[in-house]
Image: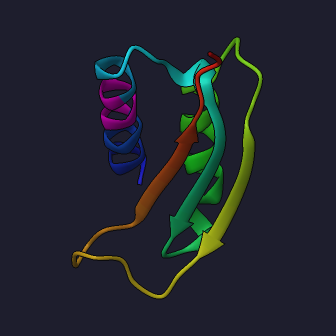
Amino acid sequence: MEAQARYAYDRIVAILENNDAGLGHVARVVAYLTDMRHKDIYERVQGEYFAGLDRPVHSLVEVSALAWPGMLVEVEVTAVRPH
């Protein structure tokens, strides 16, 4: 879980940076976990990435499966940049 959560947030950071934005521009996070027993690990990793920033609105949803076998977490963000 920890490695997958870090991978997801590393990809998010890279995509945001490629669009002249950062995690401070994230207004909403939806995370999908296949097992809520991993919730504490996911939230710790998320907290590390958003350290020093206002936490965006966040939904955590348990699902029975994700796109690929072995996938434990998927993270979706909505980012906004002021004009």
**Residue at 39% across, 66% down:** 72
User: Residue furthest toward the left?
Assistant: 69
Tell me where residue 38 appears, x and y as whole percent.
Answer: 56, 61
Q: Nearer the viewer, residue 31 or 45?
A: 31
Would you say residue 44 sits in the magenta stretch?
A: no
Residue 53 left/right relative to 74: right
- Looking at the rendered image, the quarter that the N terminus falls into is bottom left
Residue found farthest to the bottom: 64
Residue 25 drawn above or below residue 41 = above
Identify the residue at the far front of this view.
83
Quarter of the image where one finds residue 16: top left
The mark tally for this picture is: 0
Horizontal side of residue 50 vs 76, given as left or right: right
Question: In the rendered view of the protein, which quadrant contains the C terminus?
Answer: top right
Front-most of residues 62 and 18: 18
Which of the two residues, 45 or 63, is positioned nearer the viewer here? Answer: 63
Q: Please state the horizontal and vertical placement of residue 66, each as a whole percent of the image.
A: 36, 77
- Dominant SS of magenta comes to helix
Quarter of the view holding residue 19: top left
Q: Give the range drawn in magenta.
A: 10-15
Residue 41 placed where, x, y %? 56, 48
**Is residue 14 on the magenta stretch?**
yes
Q: Is residue 45 above or below residue 75?
A: above
Query: Residue at horizontal 26%, vertical 73%?
Result: 70
Q: Which residue is drawn at 65% across and 51% down?
A: 40
Snapshot colouring: rainbow
The residue depicted at 48 percent of the width and 75 percent of the height is 34
Position in image of residue 74 (x %, y %): 42, 60
In the displayed structure, does residue 39 sit left or right of residue 73?
A: right
